[in-house]
Image: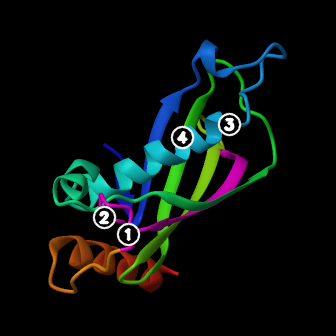
Amino acid sequence: MGTVTDGMVASELRVRYAETDAMGLVDYANYLVWFELGRTEWIRAHGVTYREFEEHGILLPVVHASCDYRCSARYDDLIRIETTVTKLTRASVAFAYRVLRAGPGPHELLVEGRTEHAFMSREGRVTRLDRNSPFWTTLAAALATTAAAS
């Protein structure tokens, strides 16, 4: 589970050999996989799970993703993924990510990214969260904490 600080959740992992290319660098697409890890841990750290969303018929498909690559991670690096919610409406949620090389000393920024997600029913229709649902209250409270820390 990630650690929570002012609405941001930090998760760590060690780069596996399978995530690198022939040059020994992490393949670019793995950062998007790490965003998913960060997002899942962010939701869990705030008291619900992605599975609970799905059990209530709410899916969170990615409708936009972007990455700004600064520096490459390598095999066996310790990686820190920092995840925050940046925007919330009843029909969508947006996350921001920072991927850093962790370890002793200052952490080196590798990638910054963003994803946007629609709340969608199993039938593929955009759905709106009820303001009284535990999902809305959890996300809204976390966003308020993040905004207050900024």
Q: Are marks 4 and 2 in contact (CB under 8 Å)?
A: no
Give residue 93's quadrant in the image.
Answer: bottom left
- Asked where in the image residue 98 lies, by quadrant, the reply is bottom right
Q: Earlier in the sequence, mark 4 or mark 2?
A: 4
Label 1 sits on residue: 125
The kind of residue tagged 4 is Trp
As measured in the structure, the alpha-carbon distance from the residue carrying label 4 to the one carrying label 2 is 25 Å
Q: Please tell me which residue is depicted at 29% across the width and 57% down the height of the picture.
A: 122
Considering depth in this image, is 61 or 99 the residue closer to the camera? 61
**Residue ID at (39%, 73%):** 126
Residue 59 position, x and y percent, is 34, 58
Question: Mark 3 against mark 4, which lies toward the viewer?
Answer: 3
- Please give the range of residues in magenta: 106-126
Report the residue marked by disc 2. 121
* In magenta stretch: residue 114: yes
Q: Earlier in the sequence, mark 2 or mark 3?
A: 3
Q: Position of residue 27 (x, y in %)?
A: 73, 29
- Which circle, 4 or 2, is nearer the viewer? 2
